Image (tube, rainbow, N blue to C red):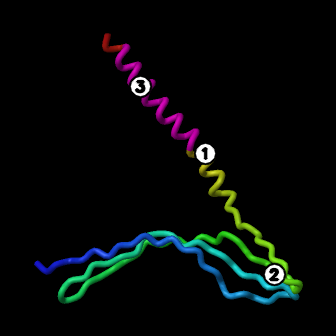
Amino acid sequence: MPALNDAATRVDRVLYGEPVQIGGYELQAQARLTGWAGGMEADGGGGGGAWLKLTPTAFHVRDHDGGETMVPITDPQAAAMRGMAMPAAIVAVMSVVLMVVVRLWRAR
């Protein structure tokens, strides 16, 4: 069997788009790239793959005087889902605990 070299690496980068001129302002998008990329090599060939996620994070707005403002991009749906995950986990754990207590009580 040929020797294989694993080359998987973690990806975490901030990327900037090309600046765009609109009405005297310069807009530049910012995004974060996260995930994993890698591959395997063998004597006669190899292969690779990646799992990547690109998330828009902000817009940089520059005016003609040279001032710069960063406008963050938020995802209200993701924030709402995170807000619902903790109570759901608490309810699930409490339900399991209650079932165990009831079974132990009936076993007496």
Q: Residues within 10 Å of mark 3 (few under 14, many from 20)?
A: few
- The answer to whether residue 88 is above or below residue 32 is above
Residue 81 x, y percent position in the rendering: 61, 51
From which residue to which does the magenta span run?
Answer: 86-105
Q: Nearer the viewer, residue 66 or 95?
A: 66
| Viewport quadrant of the C terminus | top left
Quadrant in which the N terminus is drawn: bottom left
**Measured from the top left, where is residue 39 in percent x and y?**
32, 78
Instruction: Indicate the quadrant where residue 66 lies.
Output: bottom right
Say which residue label 1 marks: 84
Residue at mark 1 to residue at mark 3: CA–CA distance? 23 Å
Secondary structure predominantly adopted by residues drawn in magenta: helix
Q: Can you give x and y, in whole percent of width and height, for residue 16 in the image?
A: 64, 81
- Earlier in the chain: of badge 2 and badge 3, it is 2
Q: In whole angstroms, how far apart are the C-alphas of marks 1 and 2? A: 37 Å
Q: Is residue 42 magenta?
A: no
Mark 2, residue position: 62
Q: Secondary structure at mark 1?
A: helix
Residue type, mark 3 in image:
Met
Query: Secondary structure beneath disc 3?
Result: helix
Q: Residue furthest front?
A: 66
x and y, in percent, of residue 22 in the image? 82, 87
Q: How crowded is the residue under tag 2: few (<14 C-alpha within 10 Å), some, or many (20+)?
A: some
Q: Residue at x 87, y 86 (%)?
A: 64
From the image, tell me which residue sits under label 3.
Answer: 99
**Amino acid residing under circle 2:** Arg
